[in-house]
Image: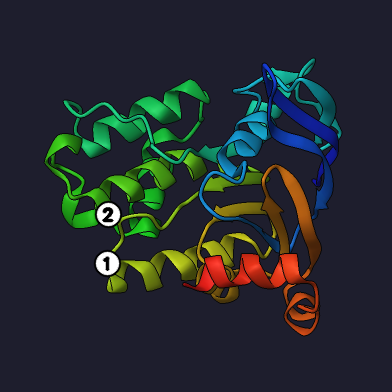
């Protein structure tokens, strides 16, 4: 199930946050959506998931129109927003049971146990979310995004706040998920894309500056604009 974006724009009055961008993400390849802070990454992620209505353009996920077939899209999509909204007074396991119930999972207890193990939340599953470190809260957010085994996964800054040990584990998990799912991962860190992604879209000031495989992109940095973006991403 691919994600197809066609001439997608978002305007706030006279300010253009995203300017008529087009790209396609396909199953089996993790796409990195890169850009400096404020480039339009989170705005684009919110439009892809249907949480923000575009000013113009179209997004199709698995053949469904995000604007007119939002319920169908949500059934096949998992979403980890940049600042994951979590219920701090709920226990980890309780929250994941709640998340699973919203998808009407048939084998809820098994799904919860599997996702806890998969994201490494075992030792923390009986704690309240408010007691967790930022890194473990991020894992809870990732767990709720994948509990229903979605075919499409949108991850907005998924490794934010993780320590080096946690970082390696989550990167490995994202690579595994990308083997049979369509995954888009947004980040402002070039090293993150190099560690996880197969394809890269770079956005700068709301416009696409590059769209290619990571291997081809690293060969082709001859434009001054692209070189400047790379400096910002690797600083």
Contact (Cβ within 8 Å) of mark 2 with mark 1:
yes
Q: Position of residue 103 (x, y in %)?
A: 52, 26
Task: Looking at the picture, tell me which residue is in the foreground, 188 or 156.
Answer: 188
Q: Position of residue 203 (x, y in %)?
A: 69, 52
Q: Position of residue 136 (x, y in %)?
A: 26, 51
- As drawn, is 115 to the left or to the right of 43? left
Task: Looking at the picture, tell me which residue is in the foreground, 172 or 189.
Answer: 189
- Measure how far apart labels 2 and 1 are at the Cα level: 7 Å
Is 150 above or below relative to 173? above
Rendered image: mark on residue 20 = none
- State the residue at coordinates (57%, 72%): 231
Q: Residues within 10 Å of mark 1 (few under 14, many from 20)?
A: few
Q: Which residue is mark 1?
A: 163
- As drawn, is 115 to the left or to the right of 183? left
Q: Which residue is mark 2?
A: 135
Numbered disc 2: secondary structure: helix
- Looking at the rendered structure, the number of numbered marks drawn on it comes to 2
- State the residue at coordinates (84%, 42%): 4
Q: Residue 222 appears in which quarter of the rendering?
A: bottom right
Q: Residues within 10 Å of mark 2 (few under 14, many from 20)?
A: some
- State the residue at coordinates (30%, 73%): 164
Is 223 above or below relative to 125? below
Task: Looking at the picture, tell me which residue is in the foreground, 202 or 143.
Answer: 202
Mark 2 and mark 1 lie on one chain; the one further toward the N terminus is 2
Outermost bottom residue: 219
Q: Position of residue 23 (x, y in %)?
A: 83, 49
Q: Residue 144 appears in which quarter of the rendering?
A: top left
Indicate the colouring scheme.
rainbow
- State the residue at coordinates (34%, 57%): 117
Numbered disc 1: secondary structure: loop
């Amino acid at each position: 199930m691919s994600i197809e974006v066609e001439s997608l724009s978002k305007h706030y009055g006279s300010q253009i946050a995203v300017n008529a961008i087009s790209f396609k993400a396909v199953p089996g390849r993790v796409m990195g959506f890169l850009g400096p802070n404020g480039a339009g990454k989170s705005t684009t992620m919110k439009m892809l998931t249907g949480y923000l209505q575009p000013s113009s353009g179209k997004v199709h996920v698995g053949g469904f129109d995000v604007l007119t077939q939002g319920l169908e899209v949500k059934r096949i999509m998992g979403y980890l927003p940049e600042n994951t909204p979590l219920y701090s007074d709920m226990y980890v396991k309780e929250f994941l049971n709640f998340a699973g119930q919203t998808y009407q999972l048939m084998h809820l207890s098994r799904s919860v146990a599997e996702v806890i193990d998969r994201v490494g939340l075992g030792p923390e599953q009986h704690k309240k979310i408010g007691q967790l470190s930022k890194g473990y809260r991020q894992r809870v957010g990732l767990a709720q995004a994948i509990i229903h085994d979605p075919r499409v996964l949108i991850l907005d800054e998924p490794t934010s706040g993780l320590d080096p040990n946690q970082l390696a584990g989550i990167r490995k998990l994202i690579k595994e998920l990308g083997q049979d799912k369509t995954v888009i991962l947004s980040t402002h860190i070039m090293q993150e894309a190099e560690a996880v992604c197969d394809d890269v879209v770079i956005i700068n000031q709301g416009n696409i500056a590059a769209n290619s495989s990571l291997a081809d992109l690293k060969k082709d940095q001859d434009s001054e604009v692209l070189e400047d973006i790379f400096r910002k991403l690797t600083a």
